[in-house]
Image (cartoon, rainbow, N blue to C red):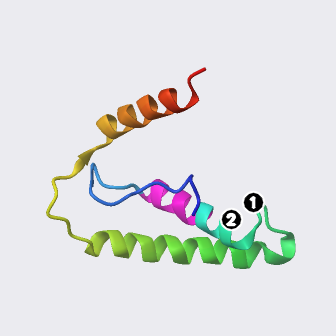
Amino acid sequence: MCRNIRTLHNYEPAATEDEIRAAALQYVRKVSGSTRPSQANAAAFERAVDQIADVTAALLDELVSPAPPKNRAEEARKHRERTLKRFAA
């Protein structure tokens, strides 16, 4: 789907409201095909982002995992290493 949407489940510390909203915004942008909605669609766009963020937060609150939580700093380091290998000249 959209490469900018990151996994938010099973991290320590847990996903913030800003991270959840950013993922919801990326989803609505992808589905609508628009990064900036027209004035006529702005209210519907924002309403969708708010609703998806609320549902996402509820989902994350209910999900359980037997795996230990991932460390954000360690996962970010791994991502940087993969990116460097991928785009190395």
Quadrant showing the C terminus: top right
Q: Which mark is residue 43?
A: none
Q: Which of the 4 image quadrants contains residue 39?
A: bottom right
Q: Is residue 14 left or right of residue 29?
A: left
Can you give x and y, in whole percent of width and height, for residue 75 in the image? 34, 40
Compared to residue 30, the image places residue 3 above or below, namely above
Q: Element under label 2?
A: helix
Residue at 73% across / 76% down in the picture?
A: 43
Q: Are marks 1 and 2 in contact (CB under 8 Å)?
A: yes
Q: Residue at x 53, y 32 (%)?
A: 86
Main SS, magenta region, reads: helix
Q: Position of residue 54 (x, y in %)?
A: 46, 74
Earlier in the chain: of badge 1 and badge 2, it is: 2
> Mark 1 packing: few (<14 Cα in 10 Å), some, or many (20+)?
few
Q: Which residue is mark 1?
A: 35
Residue extent of the magenta highlight: 17-25
Q: For residue 59, which quarter of the picture?
A: bottom left
| Residue type pointed to by label 2 | Arg
Magenta stretch encompasses residue 37: no
Q: Secondary structure at mark 1?
A: loop
Q: Looking at numbered disc 1 in the image, what kind of residue is underneath it? A: Thr
In which quadrant of the rendered view does residue 65 lie? bottom left
In which quadrant of the rendered image does the N terminus lie?
A: bottom right
- In depth, the one of 26 and 54 nearer the eye is 26
Which residue has dot 2 on it? Answer: 29
